[in-house]
Amino acid sequence: MGGKSTLLRQVCLAVILAQVGADVPAKSFDLSPVDRIFVRMGAKDNIMAGQSTFLTELSETATVLSSATRNSLVALDELGRGTSTSDGQAIAESVLEYLVQEVQCRGMFSTHYHLLAVDYHKDPKVSLCHMACQVGDGVGGVDEVTFLYRLTPGACPKSYGVNVARLAGLPTSVLQKAAAKSREFEAAYGNRRRCLQKQRI
């Protein structure tokens, strides 16, 4: 809802436009040519070949990791969401580390795994950004979020999935329960994050 996937597509399209000599819709644009663009985005399966959504996602990611070069542009959107949170986060973190340390290509990696930002907040090779939003008090403890569709420096402080559930029309009682559970999870997650930050300092 914040516009991450759209931003990734826009950047890839702008690179293609620039490399074929077309006008790029930007005030200014600096570009080193890329040899290939790799995009892993969206949820799709290949059931006829016996591949689940998650297996298809990882098969495409494997192609990226084996084929991308230092001169490639890679866009990975929400990698690892097709399995448990721990496995999904572990896969996302390992893939990101491989791209940064081994391939060393230019890329965009969108994720809701906030813990990944802890590893890279001081890494000069990585720029942490998030899509801006305004948060106001909603009804019954459910935040009312206005998405601003603007890329902003720094890691995102939290996700706003309960607000999207509100926009989708889930019943108020379900939203309130979800908001309470979300606060519980974030408190536990925050304690874990602080412990990890202390260990890495």
Image: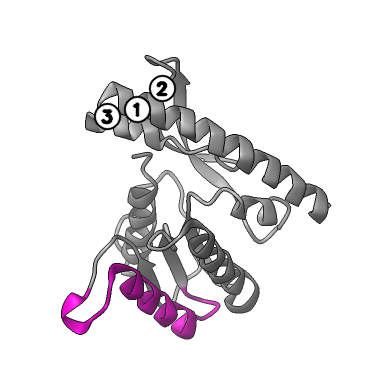
Q: Look at discs 1 and 3 and give the one toward the viewer.
A: 1
Circle number at residue 175: 1
Q: Residue 184's quadrant in the figure?
A: top right
Q: Which quarter of the rendering shows the N terminus? A: top left
- Badge 3 amino acid: Leu
Label 2 sits on residue: 142
174 lies above or below 15: above
Residue 91 percent coordinates (x, y): 52, 68
Q: Residue at x 36, y 63 (%)?
A: 18
Circle number at residue 167: 3
Q: Circles 1 and 2: CB distance less than 8 Å? A: yes
- Magenta run includes residue 49: yes
Residue 139 percent coordinates (x, y): 37, 14
Q: Residue 173's quadrant in the figure?
A: top left
- Magenta run includes residue 26: no
Q: Earlier in the sequence, mark 1 or mark 2?
A: 2
Q: Look at discs 1 and 2 and give the one toward the viewer.
A: 1
Q: Start and end of the magenta stretch?
A: 46-72
Spatial CA distance of label 2 from label 3 is 11 Å
- Badge 2 amino acid: Val
